[in-house]
Image (cartoon, rainbow, N blue to C red):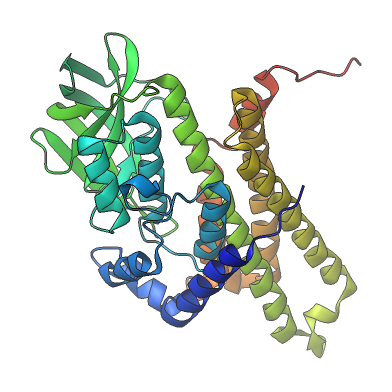
Amino acid sequence: MDFTFNDEQQQFADALRRYLEKSYAFEARQEIVRSEAGVSDAHWAAFTELGLTALPVPEAQGGFSGGPIDMLVVMQELGRALVIEPYWATAVGIEALRIAGTGEDEDAALLERAAQGECKLAVAFHEPHARYDLFEIAAIASGQGEQHTLSGTKSVVLHGAQADHWIVPARLDGEIALFVVARGAAGAKVTEYRTIDGQRAATLEFNGTPARRLTGKHAGAAALEQIADYGTLLLCAEAIGALDALNHATVEYTKTRQQFGQPIARFQALQHRMVEMLIHAEQARSITYLAAMRYASEDVDERRRAISAAKVRVGQAARFVGQQAVQLHGGMGVTNEVAAAHLFKRLAIIETTLGDVDHHLARFAALPGFAVADV
């Protein structure tokens, strides 16, 4: 299977990397993290101009119909630069509208606004008691047709306070359905906070909040699972970029840190350790690329298998590379003054978002075709 990016994808990646290296360097990123807003409107406008917001939107709604490989290209670069803008949340929201919406009327208008960078989205996957179980939903919807009201609580909604609209799963007559809620709707309360990696998240509380039901052909539990798989794939791609950046930072640091009158990069034992870090990153990259190829498979179990396998391998790589990088940096590895510490934190959060290693191992093992060896 050929994982080589085509010329257009490579040019897009190069253009995005040049922008991020010039305008989104580590110190600039830290200023945004420390700001009251926690995100940058100027950088969001730049992303729009570069075509990032239009990339995942279907052509019929003014986008470029970018597929999983195209999005993988983007997310790797964003991960490498530790970007904290609400791009992942919006891209997953766009996929939710594409899968569960009709592509017409209000759904089309939202997608068009998202493509133009005028609307940010977020999917409220989880509830306080549910941990990683997507289908453990206590939020209740009532009403008929497209117009409903919601009551319930959603937790750790990434960039929930920055979103203009939320995609919210809730129970309607016992079945899972997906709803669109506008920020500022009556009865909606938003509690924002900063996560350990500098990102923003929020708790959303709904109390008789007006909501519009998504009524596409696939707008139930299966759609919710596919949306989560898409989000997981994008997180794996972001992690690949972060792993590359962390490996690079570690190698460069060992060239400057002196022990016994020479750089520690000359010590064979540490060279072996850094090679292991590179191997972990490359294995994570390969399986993430495979998952991107399999995401659109008509075989649902094949998609689940590929996504969970990628999340497991990426999570293992994130932990190994992160811990080794911190050790090789010494005390500097846990300070806010170096990018390595922030890359480690981001990788730790990615590993626990939408299911950790244990969760996805269990999901993989539960799929048909998994055989337990006889002992």
The reply, left or right, for residue 193 in relation to residue 337 is left
The reply, left or right, for residue 206 in relation to residue 178 is left
The reply, left or right, for residue 151 in relation to residue 45 is left
Q: In this orientation, does residue 334 appear?
A: no
Residue at the farthest left position: 186
Which quarter of the figure has residue 55?
A: bottom left
Front residue of this view, candidates 211 and 247: 211
Q: Residue at x 22, y 44 (%)?
A: 109
Which quarter of the figure has residue 136?
A: top left
Residue at the farthest front position: 60
Q: In this orientation, does residue 67 appear?
A: yes
Residue 58, compared with residue 346, is above or below; it is: above
In the rendered image, residue 244, in percent from the top left (x then y), is placed at 65, 65
In the rendered image, residue 338, in percent from the top left (x then y), is placed at 53, 75
In the rendered image, residue 224, in percent from the top left (x then y), is placed at 42, 28
Residue at the farthest right position: 375
Front residue of this view, candidates 237 and 62: 62
Residue 274, compared with residue 180, is above or below; it is: below
Q: Residue at x 75, y 20 (%)?
A: 370
Residue 264, compared with residue 262, is above or below; it is: above
In the rendered image, residue 185, in percent from the top left (x then y), is placed at 11, 38
